Image: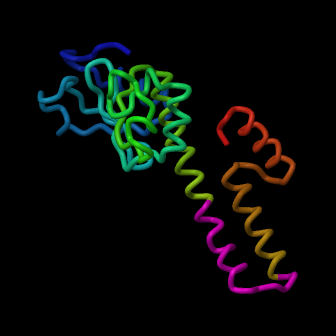
Amino acid sequence: MKNYAGHPDPDDFLRAELEEAGITVHSFNFLKNGKREVDSRIMGEVHGWSFKRAWYYWVAEGPGLPPRYANTLHETHGKAVRVEGHCGCPSPLEYRKGFAVGMYHVDTQEGLKALADMLKRCAAEASAMKVLEPIQQTWTQGWTSDSVAAQVTAAALTQVWNLLGVENQTQAVIKLETLKKTGSL
């Protein structure tokens, strides 16, 4: 990534980097105050994570990426998406001792997209778990009639199809196989 420290108006460049990575862009006048390495109005946001530009990298901070997601990200982008900004690029399991990672320094456009995608994946999977909670509660309450089970199953499948962005079981299976092959599942 280009060093934008001292650039008089880097907003358009930063906006383009965030948009290319699929990150929501916000522009706030109060951010451009001459106190940051890169004086800009631009910041990004993905599921509670903020993205602010520093010298030649993005600083991403948020509520924490759980260890299994953080480790998967590290395996493919660990040199460019640095846990807690550590220049030695330790793994999140080593550096955070099994706890979530709440801050990264991101050195490349590819790494920026990879982090944004992993945050979206984590949020989608958490959302999918919430979808299944009411169904689990129905099962644990002892409902055993076939009609209730069929209704619950149909409702669950519809919600899963919606999360996957498909319209039927065949499309769902194809989408899941694709996600599995790409390591996104």
Nearer-the-camera pick, 93 or 76 = 93
Is residue 50 visible from the viewing direction of this image?
A: no
Residue extent of the magenta highlight: 129-147
Viewer-proximal residue, 169 or 41? 169
| Residue 1 in picture, x, y percent from top left | 38, 15
Q: Is residue 63 placed above or below 127 in the rendered structure?
A: above
Residue 110 image point, x, y percent:
50, 22
Residue 137 part of the magenta-drawn span: yes
Q: Which residue is at a point 76% across and 74% down the rendered structure image?
A: 152
Instruction: Choose between 19 and 185: the one closer to the eye.
Output: 185
Q: Quadrant of residue 17?
A: top left
- Name the residue: 53% across, 42% down: 69
Q: Is residue 162 magenta?
A: no
- The answer to whether residue 37 is left or right of residue 132 is left
Quadrant of image for the C terminus? top right
Left or right of 71? Residue 181 is right
Picture quarter containing residue 140? bottom right
